[in-house]
Image (spheres, helix red, strand yellow):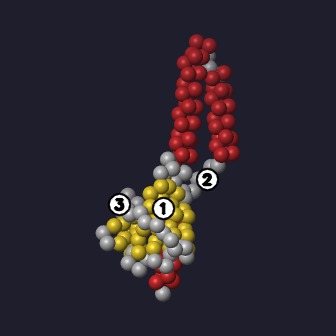
Amino acid sequence: MQETANVEAPLHCFTIWPHRSLGAGGLKLVLGVIAVGLLFVALRSPPQAFWPIVFGCVLTFVAVLAAFLSNMRSARISERVEIGPKLIRVERIDPNGRCRTAEFSTHWVRLVLRDDWEVPNRLTLTESGRSVSIGDFLSPAERKSLADAISSTLAAVRG
């Protein structure tokens, strides 16, 4: 990936991010229901097994919380595809905030949509042996739709 200053204004910009159906409010509700359920289990346990059951309930809640927080962290990934008259710029922002940029010539870049063994309908931009995959976190139908939109934008820019 090469880095150069993109001084031209983009004609079209696509910003994509993964869909998450559970927002912060829903997460609090789900965690509250789980906590109440585990509290009920702990309080209904027999006296001789109270502490092991409480310990198991706390471990269960911590594991579920860690899984949800990891999922929310991974949802912070995003990609931005800017198509200008001369350059296509792809910016990928990882969950940890690191930004990676790749630039391609608008007139020489190829848009490839192919089935891959790990990602169906993998969408890549390719130019001179360099390539970058776009939207691996999207569903195959969303990648196909994005490919159609980018393809029509490229056709309009190329004239």
- The reply to whether residue 136 is visible in this rendering is no
> Would you place residue 122 above or below residue 31 in this image?
below
The amino acid type, in three-letter code, at marker 2 is Ser
- What percent of the width, then of the height, locates residue 22? 62, 49
Q: Residue at x 69, y 45 (%)?
A: 25
Say which amino acid is labelled 3.
Trp
Left or right? Give the position of 4 relative to 59: left
Do the numbered discs 1 and 3 sit on residues whose CB atoms are within 8 Å? Answer: no
Residue contact between numbered discs 1 and 2, judged by CB atoms under 8 Å? no
- Of 16 and 67, which appears nearest the observer? 16
Q: Disc 1 versus disc 3: distance between alpha carbons?
A: 25 Å
| 59 with respect to 101 (left or right) | right
In the rendered image, which residue does mark 2 sit on?
Answer: 21
Q: Residues within 10 Å of mark 2 (few under 14, many from 20)?
A: few
Quarter assignment of residue 122: bottom left
- Residue pointed to by mark 3: 117
| Element at label 2 | loop
What residue did someone put label 1 on? 91
The residue at the point 52 percent across, 64 percent down is 80
